Amino acid sequence: GIVLYIGITHSSPLPHGPVFTSLSSIIDTESDIITQSEGGDQDIYKFFQISDIHLDPFYEPTGSPDTYCRFGNPISSSSKFFGQYGCDGPETLFQAALDAMHKVEADPDFILITGDLVGHAMPDEDTQKSVLRKVTAMIDAKFPNTSLYFTLGNNDVYPDYHFPLTQPSTWTSDLARIWSKWLNPEQRESFLNGSYYSASILGGQFRLINLNSLLYSSKRYNRDIESSTDPCGQMAWLTAQLDEARSKSQKALLHYHIPPGMNAYDDSSPWTLDYVQQFDTLCAQYSDVISLHFAAHYHTDDFR
């Protein structure tokens, strides 16, 4: 998992066009923006981005990465209560991260949760939803008065990468209930249509657009059976959102889990090519509106 602490201003010299951020590289870029704004008349807005928490309720402190730390060793002399490399993280690790965030900024303007709250390979739907509720409750308990914006990751559905194009589904309805505190009626309706929604934030200066990148994933379950040029109408909806942002002189922040482009691990394409081309064209058409993209998924520093 990764936590970013970021500051922005409405008139910051942000780059035009697509900028995809997964992890901490954005901190250096944004710290320059904060420095340039300090001492001036611009308001500075500060927020966190949390990604790929992958909380594992079965984590055992004496476990081994060979078994994903899910089986304890009673004769082990080593107990790793805060997780270890090669395993999904325990509750203690995420709670420590939240505590550290609170020490840095107890009252952020908002928090982005960029998907994959749940550990890998949960045994059933009930466990998956239980972890989603747990992670959500932990963030809410530490930041009860902060607006939280969740976007869907491939490990936030069951099974992994499963998102049927016929919506609403039982799964999206359940997620809408889990995140109901932070969804107004309009956002809830949009979320039920395809797990995407938008929010006008920071006094209306910015429009945060939360996208469902699972719709475009090259690994989406049953994608060869369920196909569409515009799954769940998200591209058309995004176009309308960017049109409205432009008409209101808002800057758009795009927020989603899986970025397009190349997978740095194996040079594969995480999105189906047709959707990459549609998205790139749209981003170019609205380069005057889109300020930043926030993505995750790769568990590594990535600034594009």
Image (cartoon, rainbow, N blue to C red):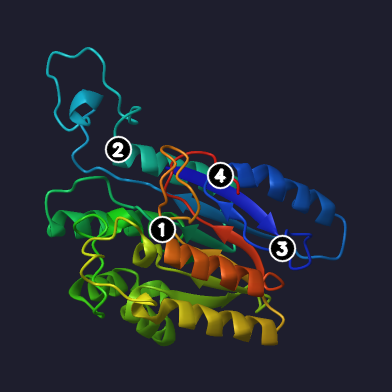
Q: Which of pointers 4 and 2 indicates the residue nearer the eye? A: 2
Residue on which the image places disc 4 = 103
How far is mark 3 from mark 1, CA to CA?
22 Å
Residue 301: image quadrant is top right
Check disc 3: other Cα within 10 Å, few if <14, some if 14-19, many if 20+: some
User: Nearer the viewer's eye, disc 4 or disc 3?
Assistant: 3
Question: Disc 4 versus disc 1: distance between alpha carbons?
Answer: 37 Å
Q: Which residue is mark 3?
A: 16
Please tell me the numbered disc located at residue 88.
Answer: 2
Q: Which amino acid, by three-letter code, is at mark 4?
A: Lys
What is the CA distance from the residue labelled 1 to the residue labelled 2? Answer: 24 Å
Secondary element at image label 2? loop
Q: Foreground mark, 4 or 1?
A: 1
Answer with mark 2 or mark 3, whichever residue precedes in sequence: 3
Mark 4 or 1 closer to N-term? 4
Q: Secondary structure at mark 1?
A: loop
Helix, strand or loop for disc 4: helix
Q: Amino acid under label 2?
A: Asp
The answer to which of marks 4 and 3 sits earlier in the sequence is 3
